[in-house]
Image (spheres, rainbow, N blue to C red):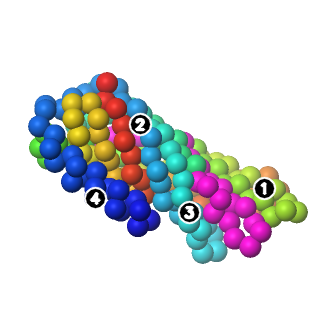
């Protein structure tokens, strides 16, 4: 978590030298390093590092559509392997602060999965849910952007061999994308 904060601060400071007019419309694609937290049914929470890919299309300076696919590393403890991931699709609303900085909010649908492998039983919990997110974007140059975002997906997941699981998956992500 500390490494993500330091990298975000360094990226924002380095990006202050961008003077070119940035492209705010069209397709974009990128990747992110995430701090993922999974909680469900009052059983506490697990957290760890994850990764993701995202992309979308900005129709104008304030509205676009975005899809985000992310997965965690092993979040488990004491011989139990736990993994989580989601694929989200959202409309995205952007506020331009100036030529370099913008903020965004998004809300939409998520397809979620949590896997649990205890050595004796391997169970997958899957389902759909609701997702929302907030973030800040910094344009490094005309096409390269760095962003820091928070996303949360919530849903009631069905288990293969177990009871349903009411799950929240949240992530803080540091991403870099190319604006075409």
Above or below for 2 versus 177: below
Judge from the rendering whether residue 24 lies leftward or rightward of residue 47; answer left or right. Answer: left
Does the image show residue 154?
no
Q: Main secondary structure of the magenta part?
A: strand
Residue labelled with disc 3: 48
Residue assigned mark 4: 9
Q: Secondary structure at mark 1?
A: strand
Q: To which residue does mark 2 refer? A: 30
Q: Earlier in the sequence, mark 3 or mark 2?
A: 2
- Residues at marks 3 and 1, CA–CA distance in whole angstroms: 20 Å
Vertically, is 99 above or below 58? below
Q: Nearer the viewer, mark 2 or mark 1?
A: 2
Q: Residue at x 34, y 62 (%)?
A: 6
**Residue 24 in which image quadrant:** top left
Q: Quadrant of the C terminus?
A: top left
* Distance between the alpha carbons at the discs numbered 4 and 3: 21 Å
User: At numbered mark 2, what does the secondary structure look like: helix, strand or loop?
Assistant: strand
Q: Earlier in the sequence, mark 3 or mark 1?
A: 3
How would you rate the neighbour count of disc 3 (Cα within 10 Å): few for under 14, some for 14-19, many for 20 or more? some
* Chain part drawn in magenta: 72-93
């Amino acid at each position: 978590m500390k490494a993500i904060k330091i990298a975000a601060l360094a990226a924002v400071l380095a990006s202050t030298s961008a003077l070119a007019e940035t492209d705010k419309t069209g397709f974009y694609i990128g990747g992110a390093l995430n701090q993922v937290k999974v909680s469900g049914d009052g059983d506490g929470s697990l957290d760890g590092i994850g990764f993701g890919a995202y992309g979308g299309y900005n129709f104008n300076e304030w509205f676009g559509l975005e899809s985000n696919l992310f997965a965690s590393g092993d979040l488990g403890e004491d011989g139990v392997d736990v993994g989580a991931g989601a694929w989200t699709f959202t409309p995205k609303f952007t506020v331009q602060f100036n030529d370099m900085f913008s903020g965004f909010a998004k809300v939409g649908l998520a397809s979620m999965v949590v896997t649990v492998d205890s050595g004796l039983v391997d169970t997958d919990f899957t389902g759909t849910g609701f997702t929302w997110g907030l973030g800040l974007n910094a344009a490094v140059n005309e096409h390269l952007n760095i962003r820091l975002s928070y996303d949360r997906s919530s849903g009631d997941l069905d288990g293969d061999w177990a009871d349903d699981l009411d799950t929240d998956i949240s992530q803080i992500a540091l991403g870099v994308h190319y604006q075409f």
